[in-house]
Amino acid sequence: MNHENTASRNPLRRSAALALAAAVGVTVLAACGGGTADGRSENADAHTNTDAPRVLWMGDSIAGAEAPALGAALKAGAVPFKSMAADGGGGVVGEVAGPTWDELPKELGSFKPDVVAYQITTYDWGTPDEQRAAYDKLAETVGDAGADLVLVTAPPFKVDAFYKPHAAEIKTAPRSAKSVADRHKDKVRFLDSAALWGTDGTAPKAHRSKDGIHSCQQGSAAFAQWLTKELGRLYSFTPAPAEQWATGSWTGSKVYGPLGCK
């Protein structure tokens, strides 16, 4: 097959392939269309690798845009994965957290994860004390279900007019999460994604979409490669090489359409 000609006939495949090559540093091929919007069911029944943990992914719409790539990366390594990331919510702090607390026990009971990875959301608004109390509650809830908690910082993003009133709370949330992880080192881990993104949401390495908040396929692939490597380090499994998953059907997920991704 002439991959160059195939890609040139499909703008989504062409741009995704070029972007992913830059993001993960591999030679990529033309991707197929299709895929699910959020990775919820596509990877939940992945064939089991007994040496790897079952991973439940939590967060807001930023995590939702990362979920297709993360699910594909873990599935390629035979790691069971499910996402409960939610648009317009997904957090555990404050009044908007109600739906998350309602859904989490159901997911813990049905999916039975070994690891719950929670990406700090753009809605974790509250005082540092309120944030710490929420993350403590999350750690306790996850721990009671027999799982570890991995707290992951969100990527740098544009603090627009909607987020500006909560800029101080958004800034303190990672520190609050780290303090909880430091107090529960036996069951809680803290990963700072600034190691991947840096701290400037406008920098090219941040890979933000046009809205300055979410990631397109390129950024999602970079994040998936980074997080699976970190989880592999923490839980002693070998992640699948990027060339096995980076141009899969997930690149055509409908989650990227509204973001202006091509």
Image: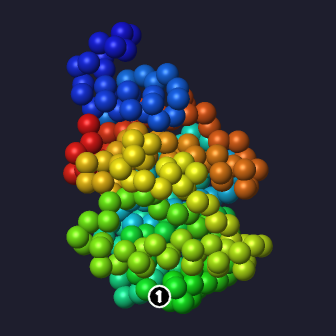
Q: Quadrant of residue 95?
A: bottom left
Name the residue at 26% across, 37% down.
262
Name the residue at 50% across, 59% down.
82
Which residue, given by chain and number where applicable, does mark 1 sit on? Answer: 127
Question: Residue 201, relative to residue 27: is it above or below?
Answer: below
Taking depth in this image into account, of 248 and 160 the one nearest to the observer is 160
Question: Residue 31, relative to residue 218: is it above or below?
Answer: above
Q: Position of residue 137 (x, y in %)?
A: 58, 85
Number of residues whose C-alpha sits closer than 10 Å to that of mark 1, classed few (under 14), some (14–19) or many (20 or more):
some
Taking depth in this image into account, of 73 and 234 the one nearest to the observer is 234
Q: Is residue 107 visible?
A: no
Q: Secondary structure at mark 1?
A: loop
Q: Is residue 89 visible?
A: yes
Q: Amino acid at mark 1?
A: Thr
> What colour scheme has been applied to the protein in the rendered image?
rainbow
Taking depth in this image into account, of 36 and 25 the one nearest to the observer is 25
Q: Position of residue 138 (x, y in %)?
A: 57, 80
Name the residue at 30% across, 48% down.
209
Q: Quadrant of residue 53?
A: bottom right
Name the residue at 30% across, 20% down.
7
Q: Position of residue 120 (x, y in %)?
A: 49, 69
